[in-house]
Amino acid sequence: TPATPAAPATPPSFAFPAERGGCPFDPAPVYEQARKEQPTCLVSLWDGSRTWLVTRHEDVRTVLGDRRFSADATNPGFPFLSAGRRELATRSPSFIRMDDPEHAHLRRMLTGDFIVKRVEALRPRVQEVVDDFLDRMTTDRTSADLVSEFALPVPSLVICLLLGVPYEDHDLFQRCSAVLLDSRSTADQTRQASDELVGYLEHLAGEKEHSPDEAIISRLVARGELSRQEVARMSLLLLVAGHETTANMTALSTLALLRNPDQLARLRAEPQLIKGAVEELLRYLSVVQAGVTRVAVETVELGGHTIRAGEGVVCLLSTANRDEGVFGTPDDLDVARDARRHVAFGFGVHQCLGQPLARLELQIALETLLRRLPGLRLAVPFEEIEFRPDMAVYGVKALPVTW
Ligand code: HEM
């Protein structure tokens, strides 16, 4: 056979999302290779469409800071990462899938609730919640699943308190959230879960008209500007984004620390490092594992490529957070590093609204867990831990621990 000619300098194309390699905390090796060799490249999605994958820190910030890239999923060419995600974005869109000025108008209704000062005022209450769930988990026992007994219930209860959602209904919204975040869910399953959750929240919004409380849903209803359905969609976004992300960060952070005993020991010896350690864990773990999606609405030059209107872009946060141009020895977990430039919460106008709350919850949950359980360790071999490669938010399915 004749010698194969040298490959032309076209971008490598692989199926996105790709599988992780040996270390479950690291991004897929093919992503890291793309960042080093073709930092902006074309990849193929589940439905056979192609989209641009942007992997470097600087380029991710450029795209997310540029209004020529739209977050509105009704634009032609918007890249959907699964059939379910397409269904959700088009059926129950909330402001995460809108552009300004509509996005800014809706987001502004909530900014007051999530500013640092307001969130800091919740510290004693969150500490109480954390201590309560730890009491329940540890009383008369020496082992438990950290996910179902601690990592999930803490942010779940906190977001319920903020929204005015009865925590007794957590089975319903946790079950629906799980379907909405699973890339294996079909369009039908997603539609059902989203209709069930929107229906539940619409009903709740209706109840708040008659018996209001001080929480977010009541206040959105009282403004009189939004339909019940709009209130329900906004609440769905807060409810789902507000508990799954923090829950998975809590459990995965615990596991990452247990696997890096020197870092764990340092954090235990110097608990004042907790704030920086949380930023470092956000950077290192980048739980929004498939990044964030946009579509070009004008022609844009990026990294030597021409991205045309109607072409999709996936901004990969995990590789941006491992960019050695920004973070030295990026593959090391270093609780004492300055990780503040990470993009785990995204960047630009859609940057995570709940980040002050997520930070507060993570700082309190991790600090308290390590302080109260000095003997904390895995109850099963590391190899038996099951991860969540198919979920929008990465993490572990369960984390059996003992102390
Ligand atoms: C947006 C990550 C916790 C509410 C985002 C985005 C990311 C993110 C990457 C940007 C999406 C985009 O640009 O398309 C995270 C992580 C969290 C976390 C890693 C925890 C560790 C929370 C919490 C809340 C929340 C606790 C709840 C209250 C939101 C909302 C948006 C958002 C409402 C949409 C903002 C907008 O479109 O303007 N989050 N999040 N998140 N997050 Fe979070």
Image: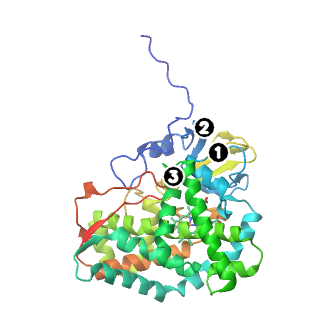
Tell me which residue sits at (59%, 60%) in the image.
194
Residue identified by numbered label 1 = 312
Location of residue 137 in the rendering, given as x and y in whole percent from the top left corner: 31, 78
- Disc 3 residue crowd, few under 14, some 14–19, many 20+, Cα 10 Å: many
- The amino acid marked with disc number 3 is Ala
Give the foreground label among 1 and 2. Answer: 2
Cβ–Cβ under 8 Å for marks 1 and 2: yes
Q: Nearer the viewer, residue 38 or 81?
A: 81
Q: Relative to 381, is 235 above or below? A: below
Q: Ligand 1 lies in which image quarter?
A: bottom right
Which quarter of the picture shows residue 220? bottom right
- Sooner in the amino-acid sequence: mark 3 or mark 1: 3
Residue identified by numbered label 2 = 49
**Left or right side of 5 for 266:** left
Give the foreground label among 2 and 3. Answer: 2
- Sooner in the amino-acid sequence: mark 2 or mark 3: 2
- Disc 1 residue crowd, few under 14, some 14–19, many 20+, Cα 10 Å: many
Tell me which residue sits at (55%, 26%) in the image.
8
- The amino acid marked with disc number 2 is Ser
Location of residue 221 in the rendering, given as x and y in whole percent from the top left corner: 70, 78
Residue identified by numbered label 3 = 290
- Sooner in the amino-acid sequence: mark 1 or mark 2: 2
Spatial separation of the CA atoms under disc 3 and disc 1: 14 Å
